[in-house]
Amino acid sequence: MHAAIAAFAEEVSREAGKILLRGFRSDRTVVSYKSRTDIVTDCDKASEAFLVDAIAKRFPDHTIIAEEGSRRDAAGDYVWYVDPLDGTNNFAHGLPFFCVSIGVFSVRLEQIIAGVVYNPILEETFTAVRGGGAFCNKKPIRVSSIKDIGISLIATGFPYDKDISVNNNLKEFNRIILRIQGIRRMGSAAIDLSYVASGRLDGYWEGKLNPWDMAAGSLIVEEAGGMVTRYNGGPFHPEYPEIAASNGLIHAQLIQLLS
């Protein structure tokens, strides 16, 4: 069942990616502002409408929760966390770092059981089914072997309300950047997590995230041999708005810096 869910999630994510590509760097794309820093495009909405409709038709007894407000509650065991365009600010500015992200959560198991992250620009599809390993374009991926956080490349992000919130990640950023090799800010949590899973990054942390930002990528990291927790090292849950992910080898060091 889980493999079938993952296969369908991959199929529809690639179709949604086609919608995004048609609007990327297009004069016809419409950008709207939820706030000065939080935007949405008509491509987000078109991608979400397609995904929610397709998932609901295929799995009518599954709940669907999507970033732009679409929600369909159902009595079944599974919850689909759908981000139709992760990295909207990048997309709107013409930067080729964005993706479709779909994570499926089992209420009974209290775990993410399938995840797909698709970057249509690079034609990279990261996938995982719980217990089945992690893959990029069908090839197995693995986290890095770096053991010293001092030579690690780590990613993070900042909340939309960073100008008014004390909890804006600046304290963590200023503490960690002095102790690592380098830091990256991709603008997409799902891509950051996929890059940890594939060994391109050694770690990643970010707070004030939503389930659709983290659900798919968290499982992909775990299935690639990495570790995913809260800042204090406690168990990760997609409804809890923070994540610390790593290759596992530097995780204790990352948690120490975060907490």
Image (spheres, rainbow, N blue to C red):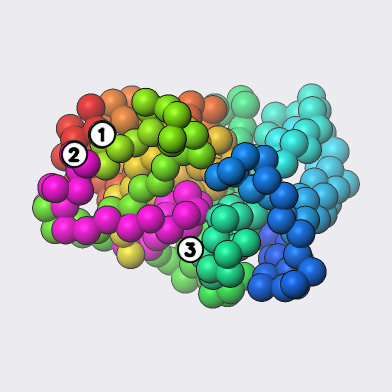
Of the image marks 2 and 3, the number of the one nearer the N terminus: 3
Magenta range: 174-199
Q: Amino acid at mark 3?
A: Phe
The label nearer to you, 1 versus 3, is 1
Q: Which residue is mark 1?
A: 171
**Residue 190 forms part of the magenta stretch:** yes
Q: Residue at x 78, y 38 (%)?
A: 70
Neighbours of disc 3 within 10 Å: few (<14), some (14-19), many (20+): many
Against 75, is 184 above or below?
below
Report whether residue 108 is seen: yes
Q: Which residue is mark 2?
A: 175
Classify the position of the N terminus by image quarter. top right
Badge number at residue 135? 3
Left or right? Give the position of 196 relative to 102: left
Against 92, is 150 above or below?
above
Do callouts 2 and 3 mark residues in contact (Cβ within 8 Å)?
no
Compare residues 230 and 61 and report the one nearer the observer: 230
In percent of width and height, residue 157 lies at 40, 46
Badge number at residue 96? none
Q: Amino acid at mark 1?
A: Lys
